Image (cartoon, helix red, strand yellow):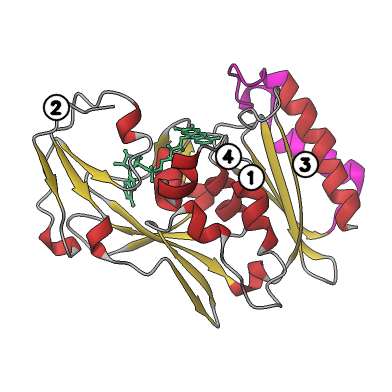
């Protein structure tokens, strides 16, 4: 849609060129920004000219620029020992996807939206991602993805603060994974997106619950848990009021499917 409150689009070539004030909004893929009126915004700050490389592989892991497009992440081929890379496409396929989302939406835009069904939140939280944030005045800071989202459509970003990148450590990318997703309707928005990762020797089992809860939740076990240990840990960490109720599923439904899918995942990885 046309945004008739916008009087200027800035295209800075560096972060230092941005003089932030109220009324500014960062523009990434624009798929959400242009989907509804932005009455509090008069200036878009387009991130494209910053020219960040989409994906950078190092011995330590993978740096995903916030401006990396969904299609670029989909086409990524990692080193053979990064067994978790196929999870990228499994999560991408959970998007209620249109041509526009596929080709224009960015990984950073999806994380900053901080919606429970944000598939890039599920992916990067499950792979122990760490966000690098650039505040307007101050030094860059690092925040784990699992702590970045604070609730439905809320996160830790301060005014004018930019999500620069998400770093996935090689140790997480080397782990085995299992994943399940469910929606109330065929190709509908995720009601639960559950991932677990584990080392080859069964150590460091990490369950990530997302979409069923307003923000992603980690449950970490030194060894792959038993069915009873997993069930008990989920109930302890997520009491009945911790589940996200919306048109895509009631809280009791989401709790039920999380238990069901988490047990499938546990059995698959055992
Ligand atoms: C057909 C359709 C289906 C969808 N299905 C889903 C779905 O299944 N699950 C889901 O989670 N979402 C879904 N969405 C919404 C989707 O999450 C967003 O449209 C998309 O992720 C936003 O990414 P973008 O790059 O286009 O961001 P933009 O629209 O450009 O920006 C989104 C917000 O993030 C801010 N922002 C963007 N990048 C940064 C940054 N680097 N630092 C700081 N702030 C930034 C912008 O200022 C804006 O407030 C759907 C949308 C559509 C149109």
Say whether marks 1 and 4 touch (CB < 8 Å).
yes
Q: Which mark is residue 233?
A: 3
Residue at x 32% of width, y 48% of height: 28
Q: Any mark on residue 93, and which?
A: 1
Query: What is the span of residues highlighted in magenta in the rendered image?
Result: 224-252
Please say whether residue 171 is one of the residues in the magenta stretch: no
For marks 3 and 4, the one nearer the N-term is: 4
Mark 4 nearby-residue class (10 Å; few <14, some 14–19, many ≥20): some
Mark nearer the viewer, 3 or 2:
2
Name above or below for residue 190 compared with residue 112: above
Is ligand 1 less than 8 Å from the beta carbon at label 4?
A: yes
What SS does tag 2 mark?
loop
Q: Is residue 202 visible?
A: yes
The answer to whether 229 is drawn above or below residue 175 in the figure is above
Q: Quadrant of residue 181?
A: top right
Left or right: 155 in relation to 235: left
Is residue 123 rendered to the left or right of residue 236? left
Q: Position of residue 79 (x, y in %)?
A: 64, 78
**In front of the other: 104 or 46:** 104
């Amino acid at each position: 849609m046309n945004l008739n409150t916008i009087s200027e689009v800035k295209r800075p070539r560096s972060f230092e060129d941005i003089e932030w004030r109220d009324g500014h909004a960062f523009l990434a893929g624009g798929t959400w920004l242009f989907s509804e009126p932005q009455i509090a915004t008069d200036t878009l700050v387009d991130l494209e000219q910053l020219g960040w490389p989409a994906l950078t592989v190092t011995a330590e892991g993978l740096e995903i620029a916030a401006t990396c497009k969904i299609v670029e992440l989909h086409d990524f081929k990692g080193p053979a020992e990064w067994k978790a890379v196929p999870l990228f496409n499994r999560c991408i396929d959970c998007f209620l996807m249109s041509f526009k989302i596929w080709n224009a939406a960015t990984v950073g835009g999806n994380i900053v939206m901080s919606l429970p069904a944000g598939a890039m939140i599920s992916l990067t939280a499950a792979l122990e991602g760490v966000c690098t944030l650039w505040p307007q005045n101050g030094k860059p800071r690092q925040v784990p993805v699992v702590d970045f989202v604070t609730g439905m459509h809320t996160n830790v970003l301060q005014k004018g603060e930019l999500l620069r990148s998400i770093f996935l450590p090689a140790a997480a990318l080397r782990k085995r994974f299992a994943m399940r997703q469910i929606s109330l309707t065929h190709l509908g928005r995720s009601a639960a997106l559950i991932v677990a990762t584990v080392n080859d020797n069964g150590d460091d089992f990490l369950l990530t619950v997302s979409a069923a809860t307003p923000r992603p939740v980690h449950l970490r076990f030194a060894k792959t848990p038993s069915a009873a240990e997993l069930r008990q840990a989920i109930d302890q960490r997520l009491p009945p009021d911790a589940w996200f109720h919306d048109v895509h599923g009631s809280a009791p439904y989401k709790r039920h499917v999380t238990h069901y899918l988490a047990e499938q995942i546990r059995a698959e990885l055992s």
